Amino acid sequence: MLKPKRQKLDGGEENREMEGGMKSLSNLPDVVLEKILSLLSTDNAIRTSILSKRWEYLWTSIPTLNFFQGTLNKRTAMVNAVERALMLRRGVDIKKFTLCFEVLGDTSLLNPWISAMVRLNVEELFLGLYSLNGPLCLPHSLFSSSTLKDLQLDVPFIFKVPSTVCLSSLRSLTLRSVVFSDEYSTQQLFSGCPVLEKLSLHNCNWGNLKFLSICAPKLFRLIINESDLQISRDAGGCQIMVFGVSLTYFSYAGEFLNEYTFHSSSVNQAEINACPTKMWRHLSYRLYKLFRGLSSLKILTTCSYFFKVILINVSELLAQMPLFNDLTTLVLDSVRVDLGCEGLLRMLQNCPCLQTLVFREGISLSSDDANDDGVLEPLPPCFLTSLKEIKVYAFYGDEDEIYAVKSLLKTAVVLEKVIVTFSKSFEGGPEEINDVGRQLSDFPMGSEICEIVLEH
């Protein structure tokens, strides 16, 4: 029996179905529609304003608003959207507001916008303000907000802070490309955040300052990245003292153009990496001063050539390095490690309780750099008492690599496990990997319980 063909709806019926769907959606309460809009990107939420009279301003009440210049077709459209979002909000608080904006000649718009955000009790604020001529004077109300919890500022210009700062709820502060104007106002900024827990400083310019102290009693995470900082290498930099009784994590990347020292610090994990520089002696002194304040470390990620640099440029400082009695994990990053480096071995002398040693970019040892019996000198005490695990990454199976691992196997007498992970670009197959395993297993080991694990 033939079934009658289903007739295609004409345009009128299609429109009636769409209208019916819109009516059903519009019958929902505002709170439900606002929840739906909050799932959209801000620019798509704005587009819903053309659906009907009721939808015209609904988007202005969503809790998170993100404005990126370029996502809206025209600059004027973006300015109008920000104005509408802030002025027509009907008293609804803002949870998160993001504004990335080429300021150009519209400086006069910024302070009213920011003041409106503060009045609307914004909790998370990210401002990326670019192409601005002259110093940036943000409204005083921003620095006295009682609701702001997370503040991120990307403002590559002179940054002026009012004489009084009271950010009583601020827990996370991120500053990018900021040029600090003077010592007093910068000091006020950091001391005016009594509950600050996380501080991130990315390529900030301290050139107008000679000395600064960062004292935040609840700060537990500090990140400083100066890897792309463009300032004169001859200026001497700023001396920055960090007082952090609650500080547990510290990360640094850069050329040590500024001097960082820690006092009353309880940091137990640190990642320290320096960018290539011609000022190695200068870097050595500043690295030494930094390590002096980090003797409570339990986990350290750094680069082995630091210790070679110190050995070559200021060898007397190696003897004055602090004892890292609490250090249990040392991760050597950035470059392949020369296990015969005297500077590294002397550093390991000061890590008597080390349990895990990681070579993230590989390892090598020439037979000329060890004793005839393959023993390292000076032999770190932790090799005899505490070192239980060694991890070697980026392994190729070269002769110098195998010799380095054999030396570790022979000298670490309480070792429980050695994990060797072959490089992704290793061209050998299972047979070559098994051959490396046989070479290592057949070699005399100082520990009777050591397990060798090969990974690819």
Image (spheres, helix red, strand yellow):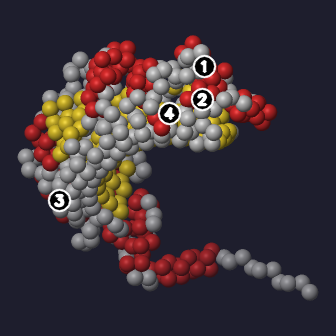
- Please state if 348 lies on the left or on the right of 255 as rendered: right
Which three-letter amino acid code belongs to the residue tagged 4?
Phe
Q: Quadrant of residue 62?
A: bottom left
Q: Give percent across and percent down for residue 13.
A: 62, 80
Q: Give percent across and percent down for residue 175.
A: 28, 43
Give the answer, above or below, for where 97 lies relative to 363.
Answer: below
- Disc 3 or 2, which lies upstream in sequence? 3
Asked whether disc 2 touches disc 1, contact meaning CB atoms under 8 Å apart, the reply is: yes
Q: Give percent across and percent down for residue 352.
A: 41, 36
Which three-letter amino acid code belongs to the residue tagged 3?
Ser
Give the answer, above or below, for where 149 lies relative to 263.
Answer: below
- Please state if 430 lies on the left or on the right of 202 as rendered: right
Which three-letter amino acid code belongs to the residue tagged 1?
Asp
- Nearer the observer: mark 3 or 2; the answer is 2
Q: Give percent across and percent down for residue 268.
A: 35, 45
Category of crowding for the residue at label 3, using alpha-carbon neighbours closer than 10 angstroms: few (below 14), some (14–19), many (at least 20): some
- Please state if 64 lies on the left or on the right of 36 as rendered: left
Give the answer, above or below, for where 381 lies relative to 44.
Answer: above
Q: Please tell me which residue lies in front, 258 or 118.
A: 258
Give the answer, above or below, for where 420 lies relative to 34.
Answer: above
Which three-letter amino acid code belongs to the residue tagged 2?
Lys
- Disc 2 or 1, which lies upstream in sequence? 1
What residue did someone put label 2 on?
Answer: 410
What residue did someone put label 1 on?
Answer: 373
The disc placed on residue 168 is 3
Residues at marks 3 and 4, CA–CA distance in whole angstroms:
49 Å
Residues at marks 2 and 1, CA–CA distance in whole angstroms:
9 Å
What residue did someone put label 4 on?
Answer: 383
Category of crowding for the residue at label 4, using alpha-carbon neighbours closer than 10 angstroms: few (below 14), some (14–19), many (at least 20): many
